[in-house]
Image (tube, helix red, strand yellow):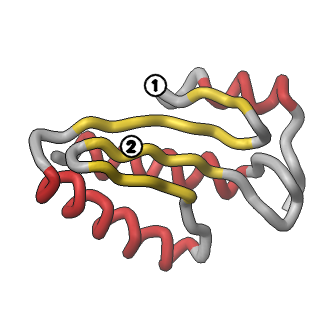
Amino acid sequence: MIKLSESEIQEKLKDIDGWEYNDNAIHTTFEFSDFKDAFSVMTRIAFEAELQQHHPDWTNVYNKLQISLSTHDVGGVTENDFKLAKTIEDIIEGE
């Protein structure tokens, strides 16, 4: 796994709306109609994260889900983070 440069990260962020880069990770926040919908999406993301063997740092308060992705082994953002971000976006778009 190779850590991406900041310019590579910024270029890749153009392909996923609503994500930003800071503190060596890419971040986004989603808001749902209620806790049940937020938790349902989290469950779907969890199954996909297990398949990819790459897991998000996230917090959930009622209907808001904050997600941060980074590859801890390399201390920054890698292709794995963008792959999981794209998967998360696909799940959200399917809602």
Label 1: how many Cα within 10 Å (few below 14, some 14–19, many 20+): few
Residue farthest to the front, as pictured: 61
In the rendered image, which residue does mark 2 sit on? 89
SS for tag 1?
loop
**First in sequence: mark 2 or mark 1?**
1
Residue shown at 49%/78% (left/top)? Answer: 50
Q: Estimate the x, y position of residue 44 in percent, counting from the top left.
A: 29, 66
- The residue lying toward the viewer, choosing from 43 and 14, is 43
Determine the image quadrant of residue 74.
bottom right
Determine the image quadrant of residue 31.
top left
SS for tag 2?
helix
Q: Are discs 2 and 1 less than 8 Å apart at CB?
A: yes
Q: Estimate the x, y position of residue 71 in percent, counting from the top left.
A: 75, 59
84 on left or right of 21: left
- The residue lying toward the viewer, choosing from 29 and 16, is 29
Mark 1 belongs to which amino acid?
Answer: Asp
Mark 2 belongs to which amino acid?
Answer: Glu
Residue shown at 42%/69% (left/top)? Answer: 48
77 on left or right of 43: right
Residue shown at 67%/57% (left/top)? Answer: 80
Q: Is residue 11 above or below residue 36?
A: above
Per the rendering, the mark at residue 17 is 1
